[in-house]
Image (cartoon, rainbow, N blue to C red):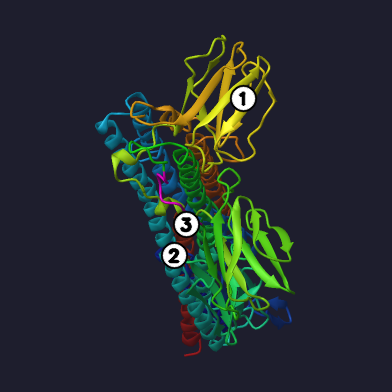
Amino acid sequence: MSSGLFGIGISGLTAAQAGLVTTGHNIANASTAGFHRQQVVQSNATPLMTGNGFIGTGVNVETVRRVYSDFLDGQANRAQSQASYYAAYNSQVAQIDNLLSDPSAGLAPQLQTFFSSVHEVASNPASASSRQAMISSANTLAARFQSLDNRLVEINRGVNAQIDSTISSVNAYAREIASLNARISATGASPDNQPNDLLDKRDQLIGELNSMVGATAVTQPDGNVSVSIGSGQALVVGTQAYSLAAVPSAEVPDQTDVVYRTGGTSVLMTPSTLSAGSLGALLSFRSTTLADTQNQLGRIAAGLTETFNAQHRLGQDLQGGLGGDFFQPMQGTVTGNAGNAGTATITAGLASASALTSSNYRLVFTGGAYQLTRLSDNTMTSYATLPQTVDGISIQLSGGAPANGDSFFIEPTRYTARNLTVAVTNPNAIAAAAPMRTASASANTGAARIDDGIVNGPLNANVQQPVSIVFTSPTTFNVTGTGTGNPVGVAYTSGGSITYNGWTVKITGTPATGDTFNVTSNSNGTADSRNAARLADLQLANTLNNGTTSYQGAYGQLTSSVGNTGREMQIASDAQDTIAVRARESQQSLSGVNLDEEAANLLRYQQAYQASSKVIEVASTLFDTILRLGA
């Protein structure tokens, strides 16, 4: 009987000691990231059969298990992955929002300053200082476009650097998880006897990996964990770790792509395949908000260049010559894929600023035809030949021949903000005047009057040549002078437009037969500001987005769009943070260490230890008594 008591007491001491050690381990790791509290699993020892029934023989310590829920841990990891996504996206878009909306560094103030200088030239066309101020403000405007674009380029470089850094971390975590798989397998663990601290470390690494790239972990029957990312690409299989790599894009200049490497091959990972975690946010931000901002800013620059140049060419400078380009003309950028086998060279000219979109395009030569995809909405169109004009860009084959499968990445406006420069350096070259003027013949006897006229284009080589409008009756007139196909017998309507040689005039009132109105070159037109006034009118003209918005309106839409995206991301980030906190709280309510509970367990196990010691003491006393009785 006494030996039974010894065994029971010793088993109780062992169980109490295991409880004390486990409780102490829980308390020590209360602040350890990823730690799951542990519990001693006990069972009663096999009872002893006697003539008086079954008598207990003590307790067995079966194992020490961690308190773990695959569902709660998975829920917390998924919530954290989305929280990391929104946090990373929000931090990036906030940079652009602050840049565009800055009242001093944004584009809107400088656009206003530039057109104010154009209005000043329209008010004082002969003023050399006004003309110089217009050129200076134009240079400042170009510098502002370039500054904004340079900041966007810096943001793009920062994204590339973060992608590279995140990939390095992803690969390091994958290797550590594979190493832990090997260590866990080496312990010879069974489902009932687990290396809890190694499992915690592995789960913590999976959680960290998940926050960066959105990982799916599946526990295999052998205890190893397989981790996949994206659309099912295996990152860890048993003790084998695969890797991601940051490589220069074969298609888009200045862009770092993410590829998945396996078996000597590389698979491109796109924002649609990597759509979670901070890495997914970086890829998505770069391909949407950042690219769209660069393109829209470039579209404003391209629109300003095209429309301002077109009107400036319709004017006349102080030397009597026709106006030239005020800004340097632009064209889109085309990059041939690094894997192209053909020799074709593709160019993209800007045919119509009004029709330009903020999208990029991919042109693929396949099956003897050209397949053009507008990447903003994936609209695909096939063409048998080039050139083709699409969305305001003229796509041309300028040399060589494409091979089947060759692709070209077309960015119509990505670099136009950076390339905006002023072509006019001489104030006298500003074409403020119109190249033609009108006059009534002194011998006219009727009551008709001719207006100053406008040059409306397309510019005719004869725009400065003398032309006479001669009334053959009060209701008809002939046009004589330099031109093609001089009209005769034209019906006259008071106030109606008369267009010829690229200009338009209006005659109002009642003319007499023989009345003549002359349209001649504008000699000595230093005080003429008709063209400058039309240049100034471009500030509010709806010249972009198919004639629905102005330069400043387009910039306002861009600023508003980025601001809305920033607010959406901030709201989503705040909401997802709350979800992640609640999910972690639910996980911790089960698996976290409660110090009050552990303190109570210390007392409980201490008392159990003392009680088991008392059992041994009693057993020892009884054994001594039996020995004395036998003496």
The residue under label 2 is 160
Name the amino acid type tagged 2: Asn
Name the amino acid type tagged 1: Ser
Asked if the stretch drawn in magenta spans residue 330, the answer is: yes
Q: Nearer the viewer, mark 3 or mark 1?
A: 1
Of residue 425 and residue 237, the one placed in the foreground of this image is 425
What residue span does the magenta drawing correspond to? 324-331
| Residue pictured at 27% horizontal, 29% vertical | 127
Q: Assign a secondary structure to mark 2.
A: helix
Q: Would you call the spot at circle 3 few (<14 residues within 10 Å), some (14-19), or many (20 or more)?
A: few
Say whether residue 246 is left or right of residue 341: left
Q: Assign a secondary structure to mark 3.
A: helix
Q: Is residue 25 visible?
A: no
Q: Is residue 348 visible?
A: yes
Tell me the tag on residue 600: 3
| Residue pictured at 44% horizontal, 36% vertical | 315
| Residue pictured at 39% horizontal, 41% vertical | 321
Q: Nearer the viewer, mark 2 or mark 3?
A: 2
Name the amino acid type tagged 3: Ala
Of residue 486 and residue 27, the one placed in the foreground of this image is 486
Query: Which quadrant is the N terminus positioned in?
Result: bottom right
Residue 95 % position (x, y): 41, 48
Q: Assign a secondary structure to mark 1.
A: strand
- Image quarter of residue 434: top left
The residue under label 1 is 497
Q: Would you call the spot at circle 1 few (<14 residues within 10 Å), some (14-19), or many (20 or more)?
A: some
Residue 623 % position (x, y): 49, 83
Mark 2 and mark 1: span between their CA atoms?
Answer: 58 Å
Mark 2 and mark 3: span between their CA atoms?
Answer: 52 Å
Of residue 413 and residue 608, the one placed in the foreground of this image is 413
